[in-house]
Image (spheres, rainbow, N blue to C red):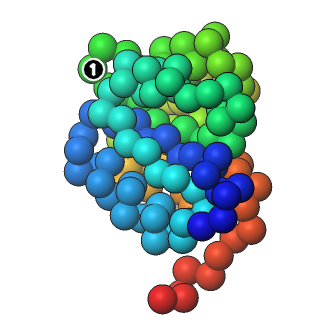
Amino acid sequence: MNASNHRLIVLCVDDNEEVLQSLRRELRRGLKGRAKIELCSSAEMALQRLEALPEAARVGIVIVSDWLMPNMRGDEFVAAVNQRYGDLPVVVLSGHISGEAAEAMRAMPQVRTIMPKPWPSNALLKQIESTLELAPTNQDEP
């Protein structure tokens, strides 16, 4: 990993530890060290983590967030992120989002896409790569 990669971060937010660990495995394998993978088990924890980052480090971030979480739904989380830090890009994952809620989320400019759970791994990786402006990698390499 070269020094420029240290500022690229994928911040994964989900209240389910199994989902977080699955995201970590898939993204580590797919991104091959080109971005740091950070895990937060709540929206509040993610907001604290973003606050702790230097402002310059917030430039190379993509957030992968669950929609249905205790205390703060994904749309509320995205609004809080936007209010505090501007348009950080977000990929929303959900197995429980209504059509109306999905449409409202799609109208938020920072939401890049909404994916179902379980998510299509290659589609998630491609979305993150394009959001972070990374060249795609060959998934078949060891």
Q: Is residue 42 visible?
A: yes
User: What residue do we see at 37% from left, 64% from top?
Assistant: 25
Q: Is residue 93 visible?
A: no
User: What residue do we see at 72% from left, 61% from top?
Assistant: 134
The image quadrant where one finds the N terminus is bottom right
Which residue type carries mark 1? Pro
- The residue under label 1 is 70
Looking at the image, residue 133 sits to the left or right of residue 44; the answer is right
Q: Position of residue 54 (x, y in %)?
A: 62, 27
User: What residue do we see at 46% from left, 71% from top?
Assistant: 29
Instruction: Determine the secondary structure under disc 1.
Output: loop
Q: Position of residue 6 (x, y in %)?
A: 61, 52
Where is 95 relative to 52, above or below? Answer: below
Q: Position of residue 113 (x, y in %)?
A: 62, 42
User: What residue do we see at 66% from left, 65% from top?
Assistant: 2
Looking at the image, residue 42 sits to the left or right of residue 46; the answer is left
Where is 109 relative to 36, above or below? Answer: above
Q: Position of residue 22 (x, y in %)?
A: 32, 58
The number of numbered discs placed on residues in the rendered structure image is 1
Q: Nearer the viewer, residue 2 or 25?
A: 2
Q: Nearer the viewer, residue 105 or 40?
A: 40
Where is 105 relative to 134, above or below? Answer: above
Question: How crowded is the residue under tag 1: few (<14 C-alpha within 10 Å), some, or many (20+)?
Answer: few
Pick out the residue farthest to the front.
Answer: 3
